[in-house]
Amino acid sequence: MKKITLLLISCFLACIVTAQTDGISYQAVIIDNNPQEIPGVDIPSNNLPNVPLRVQFSIIDNTNAIEYKESHDTTTDPYGMINLMVGQGASSIGEFNEIYWNNSKYLKVDIDLFDGNGFVEFSYQELTYIPYVKHREIIATSTLDVDGATNLNNSFTVNNESPSHLTGSLIVDGETNLNNNLNVNNQATTTLSGDLYVEGIAHFTDGVFDNITVNEHSALNTLTADGETNINNAFKVNNESPTELTGSLDVAGVSHLQDVVRIDATTIQTDENQYGSYPLQVQGSEQGIAIKLNANNPDRTKNYLSFWAGNNQVRGRIEGNNYLEPVAFDFLIDIIDPPGVTDLIDLFIDFTPEPEFGFDPEELIEDVFENEYYQNDFSFTAYHYTMDFVVSIQRLGVNLVAATGFCATGDCDDAIWSFIDMAVDGMQLAEWYLYNAINIGVAFESGSADYAEWLKKYDENEVFAFGDVVGVKGGLISKSFVTAENYMIVSQNPLISGAMPKEDETHLYERIAFMGQVPVKVIGKANKGDYILPSGHGDGLAIAVRPNDMKINDYKRIIGVSWGESSGEKLFTYVNTAVGINTNDMAGVVSQMQGLMNNMQLSLAKLDTNYKPYFFEVEDDFEDGLTEVTLVDINNTYMVEGKNQRERLEKLSQKTFNQFKNSDFDFSRFPFLMETIQNPTKENGEKLVAYYSKVIERLEAIKPNKE
């Protein structure tokens, strides 16, 4: 067997600091112990020049476990020398940069000369020089304990995901860039004397900041500000965690709050006349609070403000006016001048060919125009005004067809009067719609039912309660006034209180109901429709009198009209009374007096034949007032004069056409109407009949039932 000797020339167990790779420099000369025979002499132990071989390095720990193994394929130089770097070969066990050097290590070297004998062990020796001492980087796979101060004059990079614990002080004189999370979990103080720039998200679970400037997005779980906090730009709280500010929050710019804002304030003051009693205080501007709703035309279901009691009961609200529902009127117009069936399908559903969709397009209108759009007062009225107008148009067509030859022959009165009816109905629809489109505003709604004003007491020490009857003299009130200019009621809970006195003078005044519904203390029986009068004893009580039992002097003592009832069994009962609406109560009395005067004139005329009586027109029973009143028929005001019926129809045609054309209401959306008005022929009348008969059917199909 051929033997070789490994001559270890040098084995430097150190890292070459200036190199770009990590490892242990290994040099050796390979010598053959078999003598080489040459003529005349045997030469022992010759080196092996230019011989290919494989070297295997194994690093073994103090437990005889192989931590690392690698192999190198190389060739000896002309002198039999090899130069290798342990740590740069083909690894079969472990990674060189993960070797734990803090215990004894041994280097085992095996060589394979490719002579069929495989690897042969040539050396096994302890590594007595720890290579990491002069390593160009410190790689700590376990705990790194630094008892003293640590000065880092260059970059400090922590690449692994294991936590780095610093028990001593970390002093950074220069700029420190943290490209990922910085977690300070211990309770020791972390002092940053320089600037701290965080390119990513910084999470602070706790902390005290004397002065912090945040230029970009910052996620703060809990921010406790004991002192004044100044935010000179946008302040956004995007997470769902609560943000509590114990100090003052001064925002110099505009603040946008994108969700519900709830103010849970415990105020010290409770006096309604003290500014500090109100948790929401808006000041510093010539204007107050502006409220903007999403709806362009808010109706009474859209509230600007709502008022709630502590038991979650709504006490009142400020809401949009009951403006004409635009959708409802558009639907009406679409019924009058409907789009094609294909347009309806495209508008309300994704179009699918009829065989696949399985419905009759002609029945689509019943699904499209639902009654729900007409459930408010204005839209409900819009439907009925439109229906009246459409019926008038259809009737005009019928009468134009009957008036043959443009009224050249036959009776044309029906055509003329139907023309007038149509014009009047059209202008009523137009003016009603335009008025409601222009006159928009807000409405007040409350459980309170009257308007009141503060009136001064005659006696500042007099005590009043709601429902008391008071007399009014010269603007002063008292229950003791038996005779007075007016008799009124102390309001219980007015919706609006006018003429508010100064704060320190409210005890001198009382709120008196001027209009609306108020409870009144009534003695005895009361029926709905009875007049409510003062008792006449200056005791603040009232009585109920039937209209037929009223005396002439009772009328000037009327407080209001009973809208409630009382059996009279109790000492007194609060009866709901309407005040401020008695304007024609003397009509019956005047009618009776006129009837009496008619009878007196008849008697006088019998005694004096020269006397010419002037009779008032009254009914025989003298109870219901005048048999005739001043009346004006709007249809008569639209009538025009003419030499004959044809001329009258022509004038009506021109007058109506000009009014409809100049109106802000778009009458052109009613098919065939304007051309018929301009040219009221039989042919055009037939078009109106045929078309608007179908329109009437459509309108009848969606007739709303207001609930």
Image (cartoon, rainbow, N blue to C red):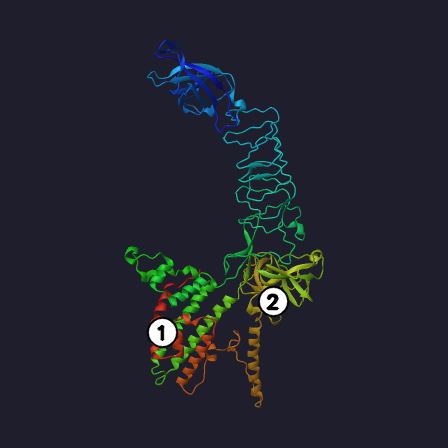
- If you read the primary sequence from the N terminus, does the residue marked by circle 2 or circle 1 appear first? 2
> Which residue is identified by label 2?
558
Counting from the top left corner in percent of width and height, residue 502 is at: 70, 58
Quarter where residue 358 is shown:
bottom left
**In this orientation, which residue lies closer to the viewer: 362 or 46?**
46
> Which residue is identified by label 1?
688
Counting from the top left corner in percent of width and height, residue 91 is at: 41, 24
Instruction: Look at label 1 and name its amino acid.
Output: Leu
Instruction: Look at label 2 and name its amino acid.
Output: Ile
Q: Secondary structure at mark 1?
A: helix
Counting from the top left corner in percent of width and height, residue 471 is at: 66, 64
Q: Residue furthest front?
A: 40
Please say whether residue 462 is visible from this viewpoint.
no
**In this orientation, which residue lies closer to the viewer: 136 or 218?**
136
Quarter where residue 614 is shown:
bottom right
Identify which residue is drawn at 45% across, 66% down. Answer: 381
Identify which residue is drawn at 52% across, 67% down. Answer: 438
Q: Residue furthest left?
A: 355
